Amino acid sequence: MVSWTIRTFLVIFLVATAGCTGLFGSETDVSTVTPAPIPGDETPDQVVTTTQTVTERETATGPLTEAQTGSLDPRHPRDVTLAFQRLTALLQTDGSQPTVSLADSPVQRGGVSIDVPDRFEATMGLGPAVAPETTIGTVENGGTSIRLVTANWSRSELDHNLAYLYARSLHEQRGWTGPLAGSSNGSIDSRALAYATHHGGATLGADTYAEAFTLNTTLYYQDWARAPGSEGWLSREAIRVGFEKYEQRDEFSPLYYHAFQYQPQTSEQFIHDLSPAYDPPRDLAVDSTVSDTWEVEARETLGELTLRAALATHLDRENALEATDNWGNDRLVTVSRGSDADSPGGFVLVTAWDKPSSAEGFYTGLRTYISQRAPETSETFRLRMLDEQRVVLIAGDESFVSATTIRTESKTIDVDIGP
C-alpha cells in the first residue's frame, strides 16, 4: 500500500489529533456550513454541500477521534465537509472545498483527455484510450465542483471515491497540474504525461486516505485489475505509472508535481527520472508526401508510456516494459482515402531507440504483438528495421500498405504514399 514514511506519519497524525479540539489542537472557531436538505428521493444531481474555504483544517464535527476514522457517508452534507477536511489535513495543504453533486448513473468524463487517432486504435485493436464515461465521478470548472456517482457503491467506497475526486480538485485549484492546461495542443506523449501526473498523484492520495482512516473497502486504486471506473487502455497505464512514481519518491504529499527536481517534458523522462536538459529525445525527422487520393489525418508523437500501454494490451506488461525501454523518439502518421471512418487508410510509425539492443527489443516485442493481433483483423502489417536504431511499422488497409514506401537516403526519413 502506501510507503513506510506515510504510514508512520499517519500513526503520529491520528494519535496527535485524538481528543483535540481541532486537527492541530487549536480552538479556532469553525465556519458554519449550511447544508442543502436531502430529500427522501435523492435526485441524480442533488447538491449536498456549499463551497467553503478551509484554511486551518478544523473538523466541523469536533475533534477527529479514533471513532471518526471509519468511513464517512458522502450522501450527507456534514460528511462531505469532513471528508474534505480529513484529506487536506492528511496531505498538509489548504484549498477551497468544491461543491459536490450526486449522480445516480455514470457521467461523462471531464478534464484532460488523451485523444489518440482512431485509425491507430482500430488497426492495433486497442479500443478507446480513455473511456468516455466514469463510474466514479468527475471534477469540473477548474476544480470548484464535483459530480460523485453513487450507484453500486458502498458507503466506504463512496468515501474513497470522493477523496480521489477531492485530490484531483486540489491539483486543479492549486495550479499543480503543470502541463494540463496546454496539453490539448501538445503531443499524445505530453497528454499521457499530464494524465499520469494528475491522476496518478490523486490515486495515491485517495489510497493513503483509505488506509489512514481505515475505510472498509476492497477497492484500492493500485489494484489495477479494478482500476478507477472503466479506464481505457492508455489511461489505466498512465494512472499506474503516475501512482508508482509518486510512491517510489516517498513524497508525503502526492499532489506536488512541481516537487520533482526536473520537470519532465516526456513520459520517458518522468518514468526514468531523466533530466530534460541532459536526456532530450533523439533527433528524428520524418517527412510525409501523399498523392491526391490520400489525406494525412494526424501527425503525432506517442512516447514511451503510450507505446508501452499499447503493447501491454496483447503482451505481458513486463514484456511491454522491456520492449519500450530506452525509447528515443517516434513519429506517427495516420492517412486515409476519405473522411469516412471506414474508408481505406492506415498509419506509419517510425521509432528511434537509444541503443541497438533496444531497437531489436522493440522490434521483437512488436512482432510478437502483430502475431497475436493479425488473426483478429483483415488489416495488413509490414514491420522492418530501417537501421540498427530505427524501426518502422506500416499497417492498415492492403491498398495503403502496398502504396507506401520508406526512403532513408538522408537524415530525414521520407514516407511516400502513392496512388
Image (cartoon, helix red, strand yellow):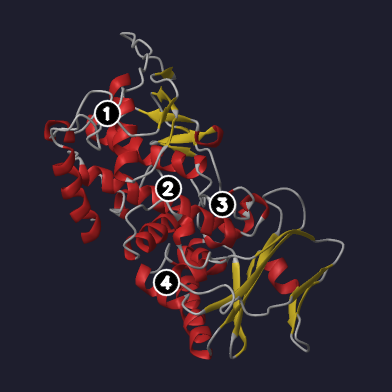
Q: Earlier in the sequence, mark 3 or mark 4?
A: 3
Q: Position of residue 96 (x, y in %)?
A: 45, 32
Q: Residue at x 20, y 33 (%)?
A: 71
Q: Position of residue 206 (x, y in %)?
A: 32, 44
Q: Earlier in the sequence, mark 1 or mark 2?
A: 1
- Which tag is nearer the camera, tag 3 or tag 4? 3
Q: Are marks 3 and 4 in contact (CB under 8 Å)?
A: no
Label of residue 59 in the image: 1
Q: How far apart, in angstroms, are the residues tagged by discs 4 and 1?
A: 46 Å
Q: Quadrant of the N terminus?
A: bottom left
Identify residue for label 4: 320
- Which tag is nearer the camera, tag 1 or tag 3? 1
Give the amino acid at mark 2: Glu
Taking the image as shown, residue 203 lies to the left or right of residue 121, namely left
Identify residue for label 3: 114
Give the amino acid at mark 3: Ile
Q: Residue at x 63, y 66 (%)?
A: 301
- Which tag is nearer the camera, tag 4 or tag 1? 1
Q: Earlier in the sequence, mark 4 or mark 1?
A: 1
Taking the image as shown, residue 230 lies to the left or right of residue 112, namely left
Q: Earlier in the sequence, mark 1 or mark 3?
A: 1
Identify residue for label 2: 231
Q: How far apart, in angstroms, are the residues tagged by discs 3 and 4?
A: 20 Å
